[in-house]
Image (tube, rainbow, N blue to C red):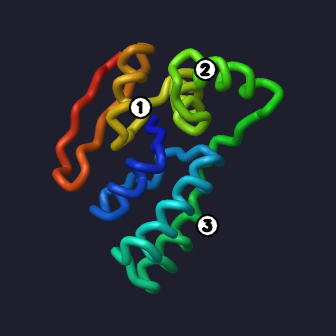
Amino acid sequence: MILYDASAFFELLKEQKLELDSFLLDLSFYEIGNVIWKHKNILRQISDADTKKIVELLCCWQNVIRLEWEKDFRPIVEITLSENITFYDASYLHFAKKHSMQLLTADKKLYKTAVKKKINCLLIKETTGRSKTNNY
């Protein structure tokens, strides 16, 4: 099973290489929303039509892992503080490990942290389509 972080999701979306049976965290929608805003309004890299297509795809995404605050919040905060990474990034690491999933990311710092924590992770290289993996 594959878990996309927001960076990998957006890169693979641009390349039309998303696997529709893969998973997103419920928190991913906030991050992807910011990416859409940035690419549309600041970088001017996506059109109105493409923005609508992305939003429709996200609204129909079936495989969403929901954070259970009472069970997941503490371990995620522990990862955040011990690894000095964002709560979002710690969430991806926590759930990839918890559900024995492969995490896909375009974030080099997140990838390095996953390797350090022995979490199965694949680094998506932006625009090249090549990748680097650790198979734990």
Q: Position of residue 97 (x, y in %)?
A: 53, 22
Residue found 59% across the figure and 33% down from its top: 91
Residue for point 37% across, 61% down: 13
Q: Earlier in the sequence, mark 3 or mark 1?
A: 3
Q: Secondary structure at mark 1?
A: helix
Q: Pointer 3 and pointer 1: residues touching (CB < 8 Å)? A: no
**Horizontal side of residue 14 vs 31, given as left or right:** left
Determine crowd level at label 2: few under 14, some 14-19, many 20+ residues with C-alpha closer than 10 A. Answer: few
Q: Amino acid at mark 2?
A: Leu
Q: Amino acid at mark 3?
A: Cys
Give the mark toward the camera: 2 or 1: 2
Q: Report helix, strand or loop for mark 2.
A: helix
Displayed quadrant of residue 133? top left
Q: Earlier in the sequence, mark 2 or mark 1?
A: 2
Q: Amino acid at mark 1?
A: Leu
Residue identified by numbered label 3: 59
Q: Nearer the viewer, residue 136 or 115?
A: 115
The residue that mark 2 highlights is 81
3D distance between C-alphas at marks 2 and 3? 32 Å
Image mark count:
3
Above or below residue 69? Residue 4 is below
> Residue at the spot x=27%, y=62% of the render?
15
Residue 99: image tag: none
